[in-house]
Amino acid sequence: MSTIALPTATIAVDTAAHRRRVPQLEAKSAMVNAAIDILHERSIGAVTYREIAAHTGFNQSYVARYFGSLDELLVAVADELGRRWQLQWQGDDLAAATADTDIRLRVLLVQHLLAGGVPADRFEQFQPAQLDRLEDVLRERYPLSPRALRAIRAKIGLLVLIANSDIPQAFGIDRDTVSDVAALFIEELGEVVPITERLGW
């Protein structure tokens, strides 16, 4: 049985060995991580208060209390996956960015939440810092205007998004072709200056 004690914001969790008190932030983190584990194995619909409770040992009423709704729990999961992406994706390795399972999961989760009515601006705070670093690298290597840099950054973001969603497949584009598109774009970067000059950027 779980109990909550205010104002210290801790809850008690029963484990096989003992009963211990857990601070609210630690409890919420455990719930989010449990949801991520579930999502890596099963569908988004498998994330329920009951499943989170079973994975963490917390009473499911506290999962509901801490997040208010399943959508808010899933938004917290998307935020955590965004933080993981920022920590894990180092350098300018676009191939690594398109192969990370956490990135793919975040893309699918954000698509689900957007379709369910969660506003897109709810996710803007987790634009990957890596894209900022890539933009800095491009600025150092090429004499590009701010407009060209924004367009290239957006294209990289779109490639990561496409590579980690099922949307291309729904339009008859297989994963190998998506990988080829990413490879083509990387090669095109070598010609980015004359291309943007022709576009008047």
Image (tube, rainbow, N blue to C red):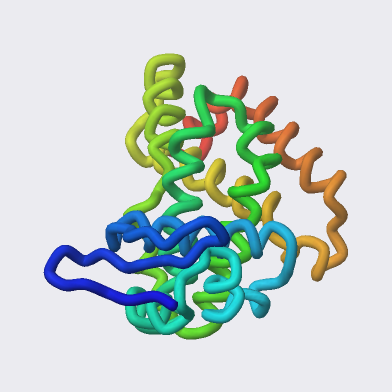
Q: Residue furthest left?
A: 7
**Position of residue 192 in the picture relative to residue 183 (left or right):** left
Question: Is residue 201 in view from this perspective?
Answer: no
Q: Position of residue 86 (x, y in %)?
A: 44, 38
Quarter of the image for residue 133 reads top left
| Residue occupying image coordinates x 35% and y 32% | 145
Q: Is residue 179 above or below residue 164?
A: above
Which residue shows up at 67% across the image and 35% down it?
185
Seen from this angle, which residue lies furthest top?
141
Q: Is residue 73 above or below residue 127?
A: below
**x and y percentages locating residue 81 in the rendered image:** 50, 51
Residue closer to the observer: 163 or 40: 40
Give me the residue at 51% from left, 67% from top.
57
* Viewer-side residue, 179 vs 25: 25
Q: In the rendered view, would you say 62 is above or below 100? A: below
| Number of numbered discs overlaid on the protein picture | 0
Q: Residue at x 57, y 66 (%)?
A: 109
Q: Position of residue 103 (x, y in %)?
A: 59, 49
Q: Tell me residue 183's x, y (percent).
A: 74, 32
Q: Outermost residue, front direction?
A: 17
Residue 64 visible within the image = yes
Query: Which quadrant would the N terminus be assigned to in this image?
Result: bottom left
**In the picture, residue 144 is in which quadrant?**
top left
- Residue nearer the viewer, 171 or 79: 79
Q: Quadrant of the C terminus?
A: top left
Q: Is residue 164 left or right of residue 60?
A: right
Query: Looking at the image, which is closer to me, 97 or 57?
Result: 57
